[in-house]
Image (tube, rainbow, N blue to C red):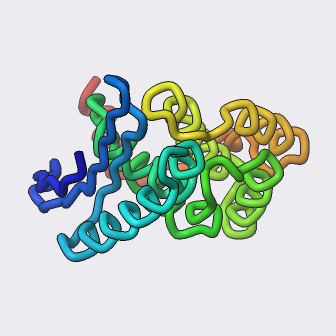
Amino acid sequence: MPQIVERERKDGSIAYVAQINIRRNGKWANRESRTFDKHSSASARFKKRMKEITAAGADLSTVKSKGRTLSTAIDRYITESVKKIGRTKAQVLRSIREYDIASMNCNEIQSHDIVQFAKELGATRTPATVGNYMSHLGAIFAVARPAWGIPLNQQAMKDAFVVCNRLGITGKAKKRDRRPNSLPMHRVVGLLMAV
C-alpha cells in the first residue's frame, strides 16, 4: 500500500518518507521507501514510481531495481539505523551523495565505478581520508541487499577496496610525532609545580 509518512529526525527536523508496499499472493512483491525534506518532493516521487509500477504490470522485477540509486540506499541507512551514526560518518555519507556515483542505479554500480569515485576523492583528500570514505560507503554495501533487497554488490565494494589499496588511492595515516620540540617557560614551571 502506498503512503507518505511524516517522521521527526534526531535533529528535530521533519522528513517525509514515500513508501510503496505491494503484496501479491500473500507475499511482498515490492517494498521501497525514500526520504525527502519536502512533502511535495515525496509526493512527486510517489506518483512517478506508481506510474512505473502500473506500466510494469505483473512483472515487478524490472521495477524493483529501477530508480534505486546509491543515494536512496544512503538515505535509508541513515533513516533506519538503530545504532547511533556519529557526526563524522553522517557528514561523510551526506558528502558522498554529492558525487556522480550517488545518482547511479544500485544494480549498475561495479567495482570500477567505486574505484573512479575513490580517485575523485583522492584529488583533494589524503589516502587515509579516502580510506575512511570508502569504509563508510562499505557499510551501505554490506547491509543494502540483505536488509532491504537493494541490489548493491558487496563483492564489487570488496574488489574496489583491494584495487584502491594496491594503487595507493587509500592508505594509512602518517605517523605523528608527538614529542614536544620545546616547551614555553610557563608550561615548564607548571609541570615542575605539579610534582
Q: Relative to residue 98, is residue 60 depicted above or below?
A: above
* Residue 179 appears in the figure: no
Q: Quadrant of the C terminus?
A: top left
Left or right of residue 79, residue 60 in this image: right
Q: Residue at x 12, y 56 (%)?
A: 6
Q: Residue at x 32, y 51 (%)?
A: 186
Q: As rendered, which of 170 and 62 lies closer to the eye?
A: 62
Q: Relative to residue 151, is residue 146 depicted above or below?
A: above
Q: As rendered, which of 189 and 167 lies closer to the eye?
A: 167
Q: Position of residue 3 (x, y in %)?
A: 19, 53
Q: Position of residue 98 (x, y in %)?
A: 52, 69
Q: How many labels does the image show?
A: 0
Left or right of residue 152, residue 97 in this image: left
Left or right of residue 45, residue 74 in this image: right
Q: Where is residue 17 in the image (x, y as percent from the top left)?
A: 24, 55
Q: Residue at x 26, y 67 (%)?
A: 42
Q: As rendered, which of 105 and 158 lies closer to the eye?
A: 105
Q: Residue at x 37, y 45 (%)?
A: 32
* Residue 127 appears in the figure: yes
Q: Quadrant of the N terminus?
A: top left
User: Image quadrant of residue 91?
Assistant: bottom left
Determine the residue located farthest toward the right in the rendered image.
167
Q: Position of residue 50 (x, y in %)?
A: 36, 61
